Image: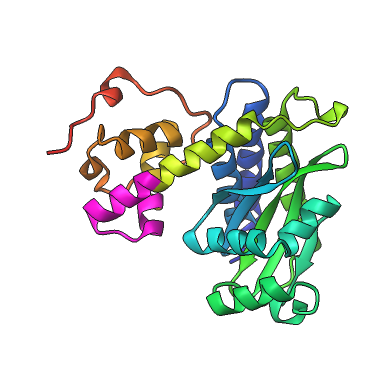
Amino acid sequence: MSQPSGGRERLVSRAFVALADTLVDEYDIIDLLDHLVAYSVELLAADAAGILLADARGALHAVASSSEDAEMMELLQLQAEQGPCVDCFRGAAPVSVADLNQAADRWPRFVAAAAQQASFASVHAVPLRLRGQAIGALNLLHRTPASLPEDDLALGQALADIATIGILQERAIRRGEVVNEQLQAALTSRVIIEQAKGVLAQHLGLSMDEAFNRLRGYVRSHNLRLADVARLIATRQLDPHQLTTPTPQTRTKHPTPMSAATRRPRPLP
C-alpha cells in the first residue's frame, strides 16, 4: 500500500535515526534486527521480511523475521542451501525474483519447498554488507508476484547498509574477519523469544504471530529490550496477562534497561 510522500519521508527519516543510534551507544542486536525487518515491511510495501546472518565460518543462520511464514522461508533456503537470500549473500549483491514459479530451474529444491508452503510468490533480497563484503542478507517477501521498484530496492539497501555498520561497528571486517559474538547473542536471544512466544500463545490463546506482535508492542510502548522482556516471560517472572491489552507499536529512540519496578512484575499464579 502506497503512503503519502510526506508521511513516507518522515518514516524514512525516523528509520535512519533509529538505526543510526546503534553507531553511537551500546545496543542490543536483536532489537536492531527487529527494527530493520519492521521498517523494511513498513517502508517497502513488503508482506514480510527476514534476516539471515553469517557466523565466523560463513554459515548462514536465521536471526530475525516479521512473521512465522517469513521465518519458514528463511529456513527453507538454509535447508536447500539455495535461494535468493543465499545467492544474495554469496554474491554480496541484490537478488530480485518477481515470480518464484519462474525460478524453478535456478533453485529447484527451494522453489519446490516454497510452493508447498504457498505463503509467498516473490522474494527480493539485499545484502548486509560493508566495503563489498556481505555478513548476511535481508529478505523482502510478497504474497503475490511483484517486482520491486528501483527506488525501493535502493532504500532497502540503504537500510541494510546502515544496520550492517551498527552490527559491525569497529569490528575487524577490514582484516577479513567477522566476529560472531553478536551472532551468538542474536541466536541465544531468538531461542528465548521463541520460548516467550510459546508461553504467551498458551496463556493468552494467541497464534505465534499474534504472540510476537503482543510482545513487541509491549516492549516498544514501555521502552524495554525485547530479549529482556522475553527472558522474564520465559522464566515465568512476568505474568503473560500483563500483556493482555494490545499496546501501540510506537517507535522508541533507544531501548533502555528495565526499571526496578519492571524487574519485579506480578508473578504467575
Viewer-nearest residue: 144 or 83: 83
Q: Position of residue 92 (x, y in %)?
A: 83, 50
Q: Is residue 194 left or right of residue 15?
A: left
Image quarter of the N terminus: bottom right
Q: What is the quadrant of residue 234 in the picture?
A: top left
Q: Position of residue 50 (x, y in %)?
A: 60, 54
Q: Position of residue 247 (x, y in %)?
A: 34, 45
Q: Is residue 55 magenta?
A: no
Q: Is residue 208 above or below residue 16?
A: below
Marks counted in the figure total 0
Any part of residue 248 in sight? no
Q: Position of residue 71 (x, y in %)?
A: 54, 58
Identity of the residue drawn at 72% across and 36% down: 56
Q: Is residue 240 left or right of residue 88?
A: left
Identity of the residue drawn at 88% across and 42% down: 132
Main SS of residues in magenta: helix
Q: Is residue 199 magenta?
A: yes
Image quarter of the C terminus: top left
Viewer-nearest residue: 185 or 57: 57
Any part of residue 255 in sight? yes
Identity of the residue drawn at 36% across and 41% down: 218
Q: Is residue 212 above or below residue 47?
A: above
Q: Is residue 67 left or right of residue 244?
A: right
The colour scheme is rainbow
Viewer-nearest residue: 264 or 193: 193
Identity of the residue drawn at 63% across and 50% down: 51
Q: Is residue 15 above or below residue 254?
A: below
The residue range painted magenta reads 195-212
